[in-house]
Structures are given as C-alpha cells and as structure tokens.
C-alpha cells in the first residue's frame, strides 16, 4: 500500500454569460451555485458516482448546507476557473470550492456545499455515507484512478 494519497479534486474554466448577470453587469450571487454544481459534477464523474449513479445505487444526496464568501465580483463574460475538492466523505459529502480569475489568478470566491445520503426506499437520512460511495473515494485516494 502506497503512503501517497491522491486528492480528489478538479477544476473547470467557465465564462459567465449575460443571463448570469444582474443589472450592474456582475454575476448575480445565486448563479454562483451553477458554477459550483458544474465543478462538483466533474469531480464526482472522476469516481463514476455522478447523479445517475447515485440514483442507481439507491441514494439521493440533497444539499443540506452551503457557505459562500464573495471576495470579488465576477463580471459577465469574464473567464473564471472553478476548483472543487472533496474534503469529507465518511458521514457526508462536503466539497470545497474556489473561484479564481482565470487571467490573473486572483481568488474571487470560496465556498463549500454539504450533502448527505438519503436512502430512496425508506426516505431516511443515513448517518454514514453508503459503502458504494466510500469504496470509490477510498480507491481513488489510494490509486488516483477509477477501479478497473
């Protein structure tokens, strides 16, 4: 077993459109969640546990908490880089996000979302993340890739 741990993280470059902006020409604060969602989607696809796989495994993962620190406004049509990193997975799914100006690298936003597993049959929240998810995460941390 390797002593090196592979982080589960990703990044995506986006360019917000006019429809994302408020009348002042900056991205409306509620639209940041669409950017976070795109980064989270790519992150979970790395371990083959996107929303379709979640559903197939019998679990829903509703967001139960979010925190956002808006550091600098994002003008529409301005290229940004959104990073996502899985930081908790054993009892809940917590992803930390950062948004950077893709031109100069300045941090514009930091945030996190927390999701919990809900058994779709019983509709009860799980107090521990299901094994189907934790096995995928732990394999990634050890090998840095999907299980063959």
Image (tube, rainbow, N blue to C red):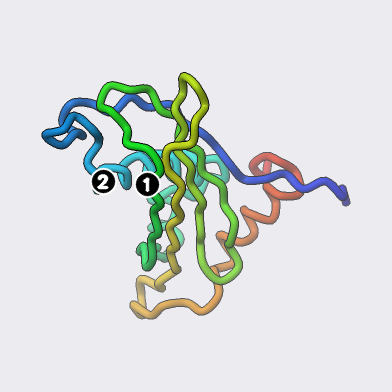
Mark 2 surroundings within 10 Å by alpha-carbon count, few (fewer than 14), some (14 through 19), many (20 or more): some
Disc ID at residue 42:
none
Residue 115 x/y as whole percent: 43, 63
Label 1 residue SS = strand
At 38% from the left edge and 58% from the top edge, which residue is drawn? 55
Between disc 2 and disc 1, the foreground one is: 1
The image position of residue 43, as x and y in percent, is: 51, 42
Measured from the top left, where is residue 38 in percent x and y?
38, 39
Quadrant where the image shows the C terminus: top right
Front-most of residues 28 and 61? 28
Q: Residue furthest top?
A: 103
Q: Residues within 10 Å of mark 1 (few under 14, many from 20)?
A: some
Instruction: Give the CA separation, mark 2 to mark 1.
Output: 8 Å
Q: Residue at x 48, y 36 (%)?
A: 107
Whether 31 is drawn above or below 14: the answer is: below
Left or right of 22 in this view: 40: right
Q: Which residue is mark 1?
A: 70
Work out whether 60 lies above or below 25.
below
Judging from the image, what secondary structure is the residue with disc 2 in?
Answer: helix
- CB contact under 8 Å: marks 2 and 1: yes
Decide which of tag 2 and tag 1 comes sooner along the chain.
Answer: 2
Rendering coords of residue 140 (x, y %): 68, 47
Which residue is located at x 35 percent, y 64 percent? 62
Please, is residue 13 above or below residue 27 in the view? above
Tell me if 6 is positioned left or right of 54 in this view.
Answer: right
* Figure check: 30 above or below 38: below
Residue at image mark 2: 29
Please name whichever residue, 147 or 111, is drawn nearer the observer in this view of the structure.
111
């Amino acid at each position: 077993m390797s002593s090196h741990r592979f982080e589960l993280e990703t990044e995506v470059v986006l360019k917000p459109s006019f429809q994302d902006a408020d009348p002042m020409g900056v991205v409306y604060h509620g639209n940041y969640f669409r950017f976070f969602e795109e980064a989270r989607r790519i992150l979970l696809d790395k371990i083959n546990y996107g929303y379709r796989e979640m559903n197939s495994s019998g679990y829903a993962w509703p967001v139960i908490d979010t925190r956002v620190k808006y550091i600098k406004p994002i003008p529409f049509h301005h290229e940004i880089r959104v990073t996502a990193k899985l930081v908790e997975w054993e009892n809940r799914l917590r992803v930390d996000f950062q948004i950077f100006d893709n031109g100069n690298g300045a941090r514009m936003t930091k945030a996190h979302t927390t999701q919990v597993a809900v058994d779709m049959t019983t509709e009860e929240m799980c107090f521990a993340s299901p094994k189907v998810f934790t096995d995928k995460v732990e394999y990634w941390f050890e090998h840095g890739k999907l299980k063959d």
